[in-house]
Each structure stands twice: as structure tokens, then as C-alpha cells.
Image (tube, grey):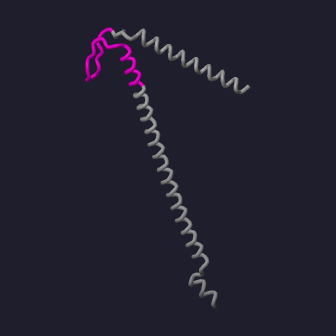
Amino acid sequence: MGNFWFKVKLWTKSIVFGLIGLYVIVFISSNWGVTVNGDLNLVFIHRYPSPPILGVLFFTSVLSIVGWWLFRTVLKTVRQFREMRQRNRTTRLEKEVAEMKAKAGMLQSKESAAAETPTASTQGTEKA
């Protein structure tokens, strides 16, 4: 039974991709000679009188994908910088807390050692 569903899935994918391919071929063949009415002015590059529409669509889609990729990369980089600053801040705070605990521990050991050793005034009264 599993083999049957595998075949159905395989043939469904094949038919869908075949129809998409057929649609692309028909779209390209019907729009091969179509041009954009008017001039296409690219900033600081060149002026194209009546460019083919397929070329304009192709380059527009490529530039859109590259622009989106660049935008996404910038956002990820900004997020990584924020995470890095947060981690550095956390590490610095942890180090400061550890130093404070170490100093507090040293002070407590000095205070307890001072409390345990008798002072000279109490030593003299104990001997008498």
C-alpha cells in the first residue's frame, strides 16, 4: 500500500512540474518579441529605447532577489551585533559579581580570623 502512495506522489509532482514547465515555455514564446513602450532610463548607466519586456522582467526579478538577500543579511548582522554586545555585557557583569564575592569572602575570613585571635588587652586579663 505504501508503494501505491509513493507512485501517486511521484506522478503528481511530475505532472505539476511538467505543467509549470509548459506554462513557462508558452509564456516566453508568446512574449518573445514584446517590448516596453517608451524608454528605460537606468540611473547613471544607460538609456534603453524600447527594451524587450522579458529582459526587463528577468533583471527586475534578479535585482529584487539580490536586494532582499542584502536586506536580510543586514538585519541578521545587526541582530548579531546586538547579541554580541549583550553577551559581552553579561560576561562583564558575571566577572564583576565574581570579583565582589571573592573580595567579600576575603573580608569575611579576615574578620573571622580577627575575632578568633585574642587581643593584647584580653590576654593580659586572662593571665592575671
100 relative to 41, above or below: below
Tell me which residue sits at (64%, 23%) in the image: 9
Q: Return the x and y of residue 42 as percentages of the image width and height.
A: 29, 20
Q: Is residue 28 left or right of residue 118?
A: left
Residue at the extreme bottom: 128
Please tell me in which quadrant of the rendered image residue 33 appears. top left
Q: Return the x and y of residue 64 as percentages of the image width and height.
A: 41, 24
Tell me which residue sits at (46%, 11%) in the image: 26
The magenta region covers 37-64
125 relative to 50, above or below: below
Q: How many marks?
A: 0
Q: Is residue 55 left or right of residue 76?
A: left
**Magenta region includes residue 21:** no
Tell me which residue sits at (40%, 28%) in the image: 66
Q: Quadrant of the C terminus?
A: bottom right
Tell me which residue sits at (59%, 80%) in the image: 117
Residue at the extreme right: 1
Q: Foreground: 85 or 46?
A: 46
Q: Quadrant of the N terminus?
A: top right
**Magenta region includes residue 47:** yes
Q: Return the x and y of residue 113 as percentages of the image width and height.
A: 58, 75
Q: Foreground: 77 or 41?
A: 41
